[in-house]
Image (spheres, rainbow, N blue to C red):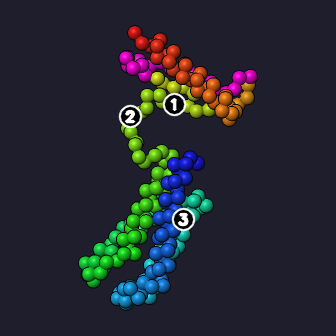
Amino acid sequence: MSEQQARYQSLAACGAAVIAVIGVAHEYIGAMIFPWAPVLLGPIGWHGLGLLAIIGGALSLAGTLHLIRFPVTLLSLTTVVLATVVGVFTWVVHQEFHLFAFVAAGAGATTAYFHRAAGDHRPLVGRSKRRSEAETLRVGGRARDYVRSPTRNTYATLSISTAPQGGGGECPSSRGYIGSRLVAIASSIASATLRSSP
């Protein structure tokens, strides 16, 4: 897991934990803040809503941490819709601001967004629809890069070996070896660019 993926996973886990904590707050102090709500929903509906938030948040947290397989994005988006409906209903009908509902909606949106981003293995900021100038098609023992010439629209195909000299399937992690391979790759790209130029 890359550093960026870990950051996204942490944000998604935070959103899921907030949903679970809101469920606990709903059970303990919700009836005191909104005394009309238990009467409206009944005891089954009231406690069912709180337990749903607690269990759903806990399962989403386990799903974001890859402890279990769970549809985190689907449940998080459902939480956004339900919490927004509850918040708007409270505001319109009872003229009260339901802070917990809107926080739950924000937490659900955060979990869905960043859980999806962590699974995509790509950054959210600075995405571009155009491919990069050097496009790696295969990573492993050999890599093939397409390098576009700055003066022509022709492409020179380079095959660069990343395996160490003398056999072996893995590239050593020493800085000296990596540095020498980067220099060799840069030299190959420069040579191909000069050959493809008029």
Q: Secondary structure at mark 3?
A: helix
Between discs 3 and 1, the one toward the N terminus: 3
Q: Measure the C-alpha gap from mark 2 to mark 1.
A: 14 Å
Which residue in the rendered view is the most extreme toward the top? 198
Residue on which disc 3 sits: 61
Between discs 2 and 1, the one toward the N terminus: 2
Tell whether position 64 is magenta: no
Tell whether position 160 is magenta: yes
Judge whether residue 118 can be spotted in this image: yes
Q: Is residue 142 left or right of residue 127?
A: right
* In this view, 7 is above or below 151: below
Q: Which residues are magenta?
A: 148-166
- Is 68 in front, or is 148? 148
Q: Position of residue 35 (x, y in %)?
A: 37, 89
Judge whether residue 71 can be spotted in this image: no
Residue on which disc 1 sits: 136
Residue placed at 58% from the left, 48% from the top?
1
- Check whether the beta carbons of the residues at disc 2 and disc 1 lie within 8 A of each other: no
Residue placed at 53% from the left, 58% from the top?
10
Residue placed at 46% from the left, 13% from the top?
194
**Please, what is the three-letter code of the amino acid marked with disc 2?**
Arg
Residue on which disc 2 sits: 130
Question: Label 2 crowding class (10 Å Cα cut-off): few <14, some 14-19, many 20+?
Answer: few
Q: Position of residue 149 (x, y in %)?
A: 42, 19
